[in-house]
Amino acid sequence: MDLKRWALGGALLISAGTLANCSQIFEATGAGGEGITTAMLVGADGDGANWISHGRTYSEQRYSPLDAVNRENVGQLGLAWYADMDTARGQEATPLVIDGKLYLTTAWSKVKAFDATTGKPLWEYDPKVPGETAVKACCDVVNRGLAAWGDKLFFGTLDGRLIALNRDTGAVAWEKVTVDQSKSYTITGAPRVIDGKVIIGNGGAEFGVRGFVAAYDANSGEQLWKFYTVPEGGDPKDAPAYLQKAAETWNMDVLGASDAIGGGGTVWDSMAYDPDLDLLYIGVGNGSPWNRAYRSPGKDGTGEGDNLYLSSIVAVRPKTGEYVWHYQTTPGETWDYTATQHIMLADMEIDGAMRKVLMQAPKNGFFYVIDRETGKFLSAKPYVSVNWATGIDPKTGRPIENPETRVDKTGKPAVVTPGALGGHNWHPMAYSPTENLVYIPAFEAGMMYAPEADWKPDTARGFNVGFNLGAGDLPPDGGFRKQVAGTLKGMLVAWDPVAQKPRWTVEHPGPWNGGLLATGGGLVFQGTTGSEFNAYDAANGKKLWSFAAQTGVVAPPVTYTVNGEQYVAVLAGWGGAYALSVDGDLINRKAPVRNISRLLVFKLGGAAKLPPEPALADLPLDPPPSTAAPEVIAVGQLKYGRYCAVCHAPGAVGSTVLPDLRRAGSLESAAAWNAVVEGGALKDNGMASFKGSLTKQEIEAIRAYVIKRANEDKAIEGTKRVARK
């Protein structure tokens, strides 16, 4: 494709209002010649051949008009080529495809380029993220993708850098540290580029940071503006007006009193842009700590205030970072109900009038339709089971809360749905303008929230959430674990955003299923926990095609053409928050899901074959005897919940992605265990030292607790061999 010629053609698709907003619409800025331009990004909907931005278009609809692969012939889809990744962790990236070349990020923030038709490797880049950075990441060492502008590609690294690479060679053009690396900031989300400005957020709210999003010059890496999402502790009178307004909704005596109470509100994933309105929409995350009673306490021991702009959608001007409007989905959030989930823009008729709407299915379980010009609430209905609220007030747009689930206080715990994983997490939705349906990768998963008494923040390591994450670790008598397994359900929901109800639903055997792609061929593509990659009829949800991927698929697919032939590509590889924190050997599971990280690319008539699926090793539980005193084990359970469960799963029921501590060789020896936890012997593998956060006695107590859990599970399993890799 001739990029210059396409830029002129693409400009014809742009409205007059948009043209007025784009002062350099025909300029290939950033490259001094051919390259990705404003015209191309704004007019990307007219370019079916390529996939040039994260959601394909600024509207983030993840819809492609390509129809060479369709309902009638999708059964002929076959593997064209595949490429094995060199990282055995979660794979969540959306590839970019530009002029027959495919670019992607993988775990540990690595970047790779391939010929999009043959899979021939073109170049690769490793930013060499230090292994110990992994303990700063709440949800695996993942990366969700790239942005393109001019002749460059841009991506964030887990340790907080923004890097620009030459698209042809992979050479570094510039590199910028965007965060305070002494704190637990991370970057896992994909940047966006608007008129030569690279916009990136970050994560880390669980660990005690203050959220922000910032813009950088695509040519030089110079920071252009920074937008903080929560006020800074102290006197707010010198803050921008929008933060002064936010300060009125916080207990400012507490905010900023400790380095570990940063407020949170990290912008770790979703963004969308309307070029006609010149508005950038960002999704803001959870509070730090989660428990509002510690983050913004009131007089009665509970939390107080809405705590703006947590769990909000905020509209800003991309040129300056100026605040325009906000809508808060969960005022006074205390359940980790982020609003960082996929933000999608569309124009549709509502109550007889065409409306410019913004749509989101955030963690809190309600599907929202909002006027994107003004931020006015239009409608919201639950898309999964919800018990924390009975509905959304149609006049105020505020939730009608169930007081029994308002757990931001010390004392009474509650089982809340959705739980902290949400009813929908980071996995992208898709929209079909033909069907007027939004396809949601939803799931059911409740959680017990138990406020931790006398909680104190820790600036060095571990979750700073204010809840006892080990409280749900009840005696594993089989019944409890079966009950937990029975509550986990994944769904592909085809949601009518006007009627605010599902048109059809496909249930999956497990939650944490992949992101989505909708196409002009009447298809919806999605990977699953069950190691499948499927195509469904967009109109009725009928499964039309399936491919055995040998691993869980959580990333979203893309589609593109080269020389008129349509391809569908998806990055496969099990991982992420659910895989680390929940995916253990729950009783009666069919089989554990393992990680085999690969890029899979399909076309009609593709005849490539994957290698035989490797066998899983049969490793029985064989722990040392449990001899520690009950009070020691109780300390170990509490500390495990705060410092270990996020990576090694609650109840020490390990995943297939990270080591199962019940089977760790170091479990046999206090000295070997301490060498890892305190000494940092495995820091290059991601297991940093917890010295300063845990005493030697607490480290040994954790070992005692894991030994107890391993023995309990051994008794349940009996002679049964549990498959493990």
Image (cartoon, helix red, strand yellow):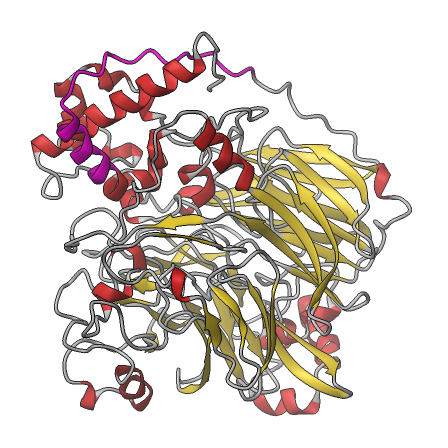
- Residue 238 in percent (x, y) is at 19, 89
Q: Residue at x 12, y 69 (%)?
A: 257
Is 41 part of what is drawn in magenta?
no
Q: Residue at x 29, y 13 (%)?
A: 623
50 over 474 or under it: above or below: below
Name the foreground residue: 403 vs 27. Answer: 403
Residue 378 percent coordinates (x, y)? 61, 82
Q: In this view, does 236 lie above or below 530?
A: below
Q: Which of 112 and 452 is in front in this view?
A: 452
Q: Does the segment drawn in magenta span residue 639?
A: yes
Q: What stretch is highlighted in magenta?
A: 615-640
Location of residue 141 in the rendering, given as x and y in whole percent from the top left corner = 39, 44
Q: Is residue 420 visible?
A: yes
Is 98 left or right of 328, judged from the image as shown?
A: right
Picture quarter with the N terminus: bottom right
Residue at image location 14% in from the left, 20% down from the top: 670
Q: Is residue 680 visible?
A: no
Q: In which quarter of the image is residue 711?
A: top left
**Numbered marks: total:** 0
Q: Position of residue 117 (x, y in %)?
A: 71, 43
- In depth, the one of 211 and 503 nearer the eye is 503
